[in-house]
Amino acid sequence: MKIIQNYLLGIDLGTTNVKAIILDENGSVIASASRTNNLIFPGGNMVEQDPNCWWENTAEILRTITDTAGPDIVKKIRCICVSSQTVTMLPLDKEGNVLRNALIWMDSRSNKELNYIIESLGFDYYVSIIGAQPDVAFLPNKILWYRKNEPELFQKTYRILQASSYINFKLTGKMTMDIDQAARSQCLDVTSLKWSDEISNVIGVDLNTILPQPVAVDEIIGHVTKEAALQTGLISGIPVVAGASDAMASMYATGLSRLGEAGESSGTTSLVFVGHDKQSATDIPVVTKPCSIMGMPYLFDAPINTSGASIKWYLDTFGKDELDYATKHGINVYDYLNQLAAEVKPGSNGVMFFPYLLGERAPLWNTYARGMFIGLSLNTVKKDVIRSIFEGTSFALRHVLSTIKDAGGKANCLRITGGGSKSRVWSQIKASMLRMPVYILDEKSGDVPFGDTLIAGHGVGVFPNLTESMNKLIQVKEIIQPIEEWADVYDKLYPYYIQMYRHLDQDLKSYQETLTKLY
């Protein structure tokens, strides 16, 4: 029996939780643990998280998995990779002290600053610099808001980091930025791959000074320090690579390694990926980013804000009956929602849900979109509403993939991972909505920390051919085919999903502007 010599550690700092796994070179998970991250809502449109809690949670789960794995395995951990939610604005002083809570991607307080940047540079020129549609989720406007509204703290700021960068800093003592998150920040000039001087001038902040210089996702940026080893149960000296966004790590974890496939990491949000053989134009709703997987030089990368979050919102707001029933009968409440949704015919008895509870990123890129139910009647029952949420989030997925196809991308199947992949009804709706087979991956595959371990392994040569390793280690558990009758219904309803929102777009914008003045 071959003795395993190499183990890898992947950590993902997501919006809702932080999770870590230890993986052996054959793809078996040796240990895993997770802890919940809390959101902080200090005011309207403001969403923050405490970086100290990020580290406390990370250190605790690392102690758990190193204790589970045991010292013989821990000393064979060859590399660590950290991914995270993106984009984050976390300011540190020169000594590495946190100056304020992190403004996470959900924070939209800086919409005024975003409009100022767009007006100053011109929309088309700004898009040509950043290679994407401007949105309040990103970094330039958040930095400008910080400089204007908290000048004393800003004066003390030495570096602004991403969430994963902060965990890397706690592990290694190095303040860094990976090229993946840099490219998503909307501070990077996509032509030169350097921080944009034009954006620096508009926001009055030298990005080359306040942001670390980007490095490759699999480049070793430091090693675990003695202090970090004491806090985590790791041993000092383990290499740490720069890491990536949870989007990029998730793409690796889905095994998306060939053109013609799409991938969805289905969680609180949905991250949608489609490979492409050439760089797209920069003035379209969903653009390509460079990709390091052999045979897939570029990647369409489209985030949908509230997919799984829409289902959780329903449970938190209206789901007491369902929660009580599930508790009484000893079943998982999400399984019960699936059962109720399956009892409703496609089309949800005329109810259509628009899942814009937090505005929308791809392909709308606006903060004023809002969630809507259209078609409610006296005949509507709760299970109609439940199915409409499954369908509405699937309409949003179709909107994204249709936009990507219009830009030249090709997708013949969808690989789904994450918590959403556990819902067979939802996956069946997606297969029918898209008229393509849905591949459900095994429990290990698709988990974002699994993608981190692949990046780590590539960085130190454990997985020299990343595409080959992905094909070997990532397993498809089930293939779900479209239901023709459902697909016919969705083909008839999808145009209304698009048209009704377009008709309401300007009214929603004016409505949100009025609400902002009122509240």
Image (cartoon, rainbow, N blue to C red):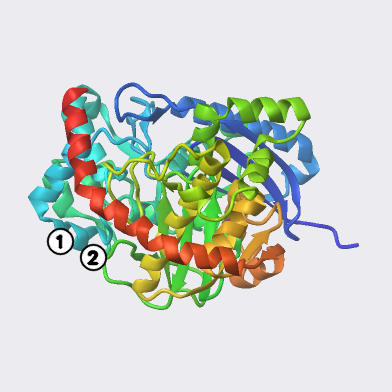
Q: Is residue 31 above or below residue 452?
A: above
Q: Quadrant of residue 24?
A: bottom right
User: Which residue does the numbered mark 2 point to in the structure image?
Assistant: 283
Secondary structure at numbered mark 2 = loop
Mark 1 is surrounded, within 10 Å at the Cα level, by few (under 14), some (14 to 19) or many (20 or more) other residues, namely few
The circle on residue 356 is none
Q: Position of residue 213 (x, y in %)?
A: 33, 51
Q: Are marks 1 and 2 in contact (CB under 8 Å)?
A: yes
- Residue at 44 percent of width and 43 percent of height: 306
Q: Is residue 313 above or below residue 299?
A: above
Q: Position of residue 471 (x, y in %)?
A: 66, 70
Viewer-closest of 275 and 148 = 275
Q: Position of residue 125 (x, y in %)?
A: 14, 60
Amino acid type of the residue that numbered disc 1 sits on in the rendered structure: Asp
Secondary structure at numbered mark 1 = helix
Image label count: 2
Looking at the image, residue 193 sits to the left or right of residue 291; the answer is: left
Q: Tell me the quarter of the image containing the C terminus.
A: top left
User: Which residue does the numbered mark 1 point to in the structure image?
Assistant: 124
Q: Is residue 25 above or below residue 140?
A: below
Residue lying at the far left of the rendered structure: 120
Say if residue 246 shows up in the picture: no
- Residue at 51 percent of width and 34 percent of height: 314
Looking at the image, residue 199 sits to the left or right of residue 268; the answer is: left
Viewer-closest of 53 and 205 = 53
Q: Quadrant of residue 507?
A: top left
Q: Which of the two labelled residues, at mark 1 and mark 2, occupies the earlier sequence position?
A: 1
- Residue at 49 percent of width and 34 percent of height: 313
Mark 1–mark 2 Cα distance, whole angstroms, equals: 7 Å
Q: Tell me the quarter of the image containing the N terminus.
A: bottom right
Amino acid type of the residue that numbered disc 2 sits on in the rendered structure: Asp
- Residue at 55 percent of width and 36 percent of height: 382
